[in-house]
Image: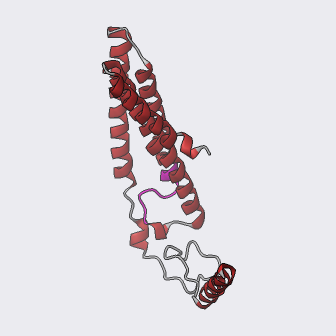
Amino acid sequence: MSALNSTRLLSVYDSLRLATPIMAPSNITANSTANSESTALPIDPTRAAESNLLQILAVLTIFHILALVCVSLRVYSRVVVVKSPGIDDVCMVLSAACAIGGWAAFLLQARHGLGRHQEALSKDDLVAFRHAGFWQAIVSATCALAFLKLSIGFNLLRLSTCKWYTWCLRVTMGMCIHLGCLDHCG
């Protein structure tokens, strides 16, 4: 009985799939299509020339520099002044290194259309832009934040006095490791 139902569902699915017209994505334009250049709408030259690249890179660079200054001051105070560096400082430096990697991915995106309208980009630039954005999301948004959370967790472990609090912190840090870094490797 269930095999008959699954066969009916597959036939209904096939009939719907064949009856539904295949729609082109809305972001395909004259620059990114190979066969249908005559049917694509022309791109407005003033819209194609618009770019917010300088503003985006200025904000990104300022905040990355501020973050690196803060991390440098933290490491200096822990290593030189207090002379008690810990694993939390190592995690913070790794987080800053990942943030620099994410900033480098933004620079790669700048070469391929960051700040410009999507329909003004060629297909090759759009693919390269999205590829750099993928790696920026993994390196900066995922791994850097995971190391930041681990740094905070290790710093809180220094202050813990009861076993329940220590156990909860370690479980939370384990989840950060699994979801933040290892989840993307396998």
Task: Report whether residue 28 is seen.
Answer: yes
86 or 51: nearer the eye?
86
Q: Residue at x 60, y 91 (%)?
A: 19
**Is residue 145 inside the magenta stretch?**
no
Question: x, y (%) of residue 1?
Answer: 66, 82
Give the quadrant of the C terminus.
top right
Q: Is 70 placed above or below 138 here? A: above
47 or 166: nearer the eye?
166
Question: x, y (%) of residue 53?
Answer: 40, 54
Q: Is 45 placed above or below 174 here? A: below
Main SS category, magenta section: loop
Q: How many marks?
A: 0
Question: x, y (%) of residue 128?
Answer: 57, 56
Which span is picked out in magenta?
108-117
171 or 186: nearer the eye?
171
In the rendered structure, the answer to whether residue 184 lies left or right of residue 149 reads: right
Q: Residue at x 51, y 46 (%)?
A: 138
